[in-house]
Amino acid sequence: MAVKPVVDGIEQEHLGRLVVVRVNVQDPAGKVLGDRYATVFTPTFVFFDSEGEIAWRGVGAIDPAEVRRRMSP
């Protein structure tokens, strides 16, 4: 929950370029996705490119500057 305001800010800043999907890995459907993407720790952030491939991932606090760098053309 501590990173929620940061993620919300990133989502607003990149509206239309970035889709944020929050998954609760405690729920059955979330567990399936967590297993599929080898999520061991929470929070885990998985960023996909436009082709649906994992572009990068991070665990723990997320740095908005890193998101900006990764999203640069």
Image (spheres, helix red, strand yellow):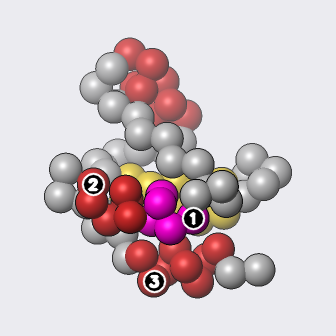
Residue at mark 2 to residue at mark 3: CA–CA distance = 16 Å
The residue under the point 42% across, 76% down is 64
Kindly identify which residue carries mark 3.
65
Secondary structure type for disc 1: loop
Q: Is residue 38 left or right of residue 26?
A: right
Nearer the observer: mark 3 or 1; the answer is 1
What secondary structure do most residues of the magenta stretch adopt?
helix
Residue 47 vertical placement versus 61 (above, below): above
Which residue is at the front of the view, 21 or 39? 21
Residue at mark 3 to residue at mark 1: CA–CA distance = 12 Å
**Circles 3, 1 touching at the beta carbon (< 8 Å):** no
For the C terminus, the image quarter is bottom right
Which residue type does callout 1 highlight? His
Q: Quadrant of residue 48?
A: bottom right
Nearer the observer: mark 1 or 2; the answer is 1
Badge 1, how many Cα within 10 Å: few under 14, some, many 20+?
Answer: some
Give the percent coordinates (x, y) of residue 46: 52, 54
Kindly identify which residue carries mark 2.
4
Which residue type does callout 3 highlight? Ala
Q: Is residue 19 left or right of residue 6?
A: right
Q: Specify whether residue 56 is in view.
A: yes
Earlier-in-chain disc, 2 versus 3? 2
Badge 3, how many Cα within 10 Å: few under 14, some, many 20+?
Answer: few
Give the percent coordinates (x, y) of residue 38: 48, 43
Residue stretch rendered in magenta on the structure: 10-14
Earlier-in-chain disc, 3 versus 1? 1
